[in-house]
Amino acid sequence: MAHGRFLAAHLEWPPRRRGNQYLADLAGLAFAAAYRPSGDEADLWLAFAAAQLAAEIPRQFGPDGGGFEASTLYHRLSAELALYPAALLLGLPEARGQAAAALPAKRWRRRPPLDTAPRPWPPLGPRALGRLAAAIRFAADVTKPSGQAAQIGDTDSGRLFKLAPAFDLDGAAPLERDLDLGGLLAAGAGLFDPDRPPPAWAAVETRIVAALAGGRRPALERPAPPPHPLAGEPPPDRPAERVVRLRLRLPDPTALDGRLALAYPDFGLYLWRGPRLFLALRCGAVGRDGTGGHAHNDQLGVELEVDGVPWARDPGTGCYTPDLALRDRYRSVLAHFAPRDGAAEPGRLDLGPFRLEDHADARLASFDATAIVAWHRGFGRPVVRHLRVEGAELLVEDRLGGDRVGPATRIETHVIESPAALVALWGLDLPFSPGYGRFST
């Protein structure tokens, strides 16, 4: 009872810029209410948590399902914070839910206010549940064929639950699952039909979510896949001052075969996915109502994995406030396989460890399964990145100053035949950080 009362009295609800902390408050309040027997106080918690989850899920997950904090790992945390209480609410006895829904709103004397009774029960309608189903699909699509998620933005390794085994079958060694979203995918399968089979090691999460929901599965039309091809705003038609052209020669060009183009414009991520290929281009808002609390200077940055081998990957987060200089090194454009203009940053890093203005204002120009063009103005002049498949090569071309290659344009060409060569050329030498405070080679 004390936990529920504390949560009700300390809700992390600013009218704007609230994030996963508020989802955590609502999840805790829903579980505290469900644990208690029916009564005015517990039912009031239940009524409030249910109504707020119905409103907050569509706010924190865009129409494409991507979390609004510009982070794939905070997406996992927020999706878990929404999914488990959603299943709990679905599985509650109808009489308990109706009693909570009928309570007068004036009994809730805190902010934000409670909607006027009677409130709908079940509380999560097609809009909220559709966003939640799309969030699970997003998690599946940002997972590489190797099983590791693309690491966009911050991670503090936060989870709602860690229910799957942490050790291998003989208990001899811990399992490395920092960037594995399999637990979320399995949990989602307890409520929605999965787009891809979740991993067997996380089956316990499927069973627990299904049990919370009482075996009920919401009647829900499967959300449409992200659309493609896309056409956006073309880059400025002016001569480029300089072009850096990289020709990536893959050991086996057939690894590019069978790729699909998947667009997540609300999150700001554009993917080429295939059985052996994963390529992600970051191009979109900095998140969290424009404050960029968990975003990095990664606009037009690329993650590339071929046959399970990382050619370019986001280095992660390192840590937060214990070492602010290290935090900025991991947020810097120089830590990412993104366009460069010397040591300039496309967004200021000196505004605080949890603020990054959307100075770059990145724009997608075009996107399909053969080519991607995107650009931004973060360096005070436009920079345009072209990605395209040319025969047996993957071309990455950065045009600084404009999109037109003219007679005076300086062109610098590099042929890249290995991941090590790309790492050396671009200076991607930060230790890889797959989890908060964790570093590996």
Image (cartoon, rainbow, N blue to C red):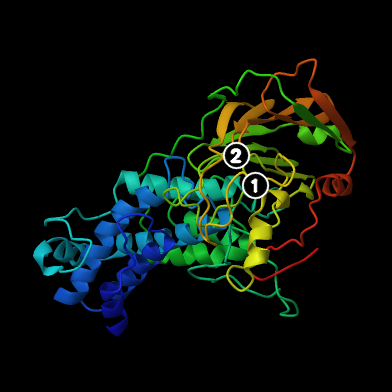
- The number of discs equals 2
Q: Pointer 2 and pointer 1: residues touching (CB < 8 Å)?
A: yes
Query: Could you classify mark 2 by the number of other residues whose Cα lies within 10 Å: few (under 14), some (14-19), or many (20 or more)?
Result: many
Q: Position of residue 237 (x, y in %)?
A: 63, 18
Q: Quadrant of the C terminus?
A: bottom right
- The residue located at (67%, 42%) in the rendering is 301
Is there any visible trace of residue 29 in the rendered image? yes
- The residue located at (57%, 22%) in the rendering is 234
Looking at the image, is 70 positioned above or below residue 96? above
Residue ID for mark 2: 378
Task: Using the image as rendered, state which of residue 260 and residue 355 is in the foreground.
Answer: 355
- Res 50 quadrant in image: bottom left
Q: Residue furthest top?
A: 407
Q: Position of residue 300 (x, y in %)?
A: 64, 39
Residue ID for mark 1: 345
Q: Amino acid at mark 1?
A: Glu
Q: Quadrant of the N terminus?
A: bottom left
Q: Residue furthest bottom?
A: 2
Looking at the image, is 253 positioned above or below residue 329? above
Q: Position of residue 140 (x, y in %)?
A: 58, 48
Q: Position of residue 206 (x, y in %)?
A: 50, 62
- The residue located at (51%, 30%) in the rendering is 227
Looking at the image, is 210 positioned above or below residue 312? below
Task: Using the image as rendered, state which of residue 372 and residue 122 is in the foreground.
Answer: 372
Is there any visible trace of residue 369 in the rendered image? no
Which label was assigned to residue 278? none
- The residue located at (72%, 40%) in the rendering is 341
Q: Amino acid at mark 2?
A: Gly
Asked if residue 99 lies left or right of residue 36, the reply is left
Task: Using the image as rendered, state which of residue 379 and residue 164 is in the foreground.
Answer: 379
